[in-house]
Image (cartoon, grey):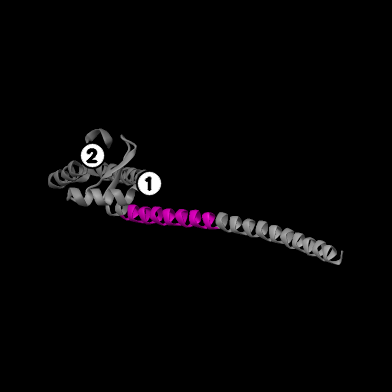
Amino acid sequence: MKEQKNLALVRQEVGVITDRMTVEKNTLRAVVSDREVEENRLAEARRQADAATVVVAAIDEGLEAVCSGALAFSEQEDKVKWGENAPQDVEERKRLGARLKPGLPLITKIAAMAARVVKKFLAMERERLREDLAFVSGLRAQLSEAQAETLSSIEDRNGFDKGTK
C-alpha cells in the first residue's frame, strides 16, 4: 500500500510537472510567434524605409534635373518631358528616367509649380517692358530719325508689335 501511495504521489507530481511543461511550451510558442510577428513588422518597416530612401533620392535628382533644364513641364501634355539640357545619349536618358521613376508624381507636381511661377514672372516682366516701351514711345515725337529707328529695332527684337503699345 505504501508503494501505491508513493506511486500515486509520483503520478501526481508527474501530472503537475507535465501541466507546467505544457504551460511553458504554450508560453514559449506564444513568445516565438510574437517574435516572428515583430520580425516581420521590422522587415516590412525596413522595406518601406528603403523604398522611401529611393523615392527621396529620385525626387532630389529630379529637382536638380528640373532646375538645370534637363526636365521641363509640358502644360499641353500635363507631364514632364526632356528639356533643353537633357542628356543627348539615349542610354543615359533611360538610366536617368529609371532613377527618377519612383519620384515622378511629385517631380511632376513640382515642375508644374515651377513652370507656373516662371510663366507668371515672365508675364510680369513683359508687362513691365510694355509699360517702359509705351513711355519711351510717347517720347518718339521728340526723337531724331536715327533714334526712332533704334527704338523700332528694339521693339522688333523684343517681340512688341505696334498693337501692344
Magenta span main SS = helix
Residue at the outermost right position? 1
Q: What stretch is highlighted in magenta?
A: 39-64
Picture disc at residue 4: none
The secondary structure type at the circle numbered 2 is: loop
Query: Is residue 85 visible to us here?
Result: no
Left or right of 27? Residue 1 is: right
Query: Is residue 2 visible to us here?
Result: yes
Picture disc at residue 117: 1
In the image, residue 27 lies at what x, y percent? 67, 59
Residue at the outermost left position? 146
Q: Residue at x 44, y 54 (%)?
A: 52
Does residue 32 belong to the magenta stretch? no
Q: Which residue is drawn at 19% across and 50% down?
A: 91
**As rendered, which of 30 and 81 lies closer to the eye?**
30
Given this view, does label 2 or label 1 mark the residue nearer the observer?
Answer: 1
- Residue at which label 2 appears: 160
Exactly how many numbered labels are in the figure? 2
In the image, residue 13 lies at what x, y percent? 78, 64
Q: Which residue is drawn at 23% across and 39% down?
A: 160
Left or right of 46? Residue 71 is: left
Give the distance between the C-alpha atoms of the residues marked 2 and 1, in whole angstroms: 23 Å
In the image, residue 108 lies at what x, y percent? 36, 44
Quarter holding residue 50 = bottom left
Left or right of 14? Residue 37 is: left
Left or right of 164? Residue 6 is: right
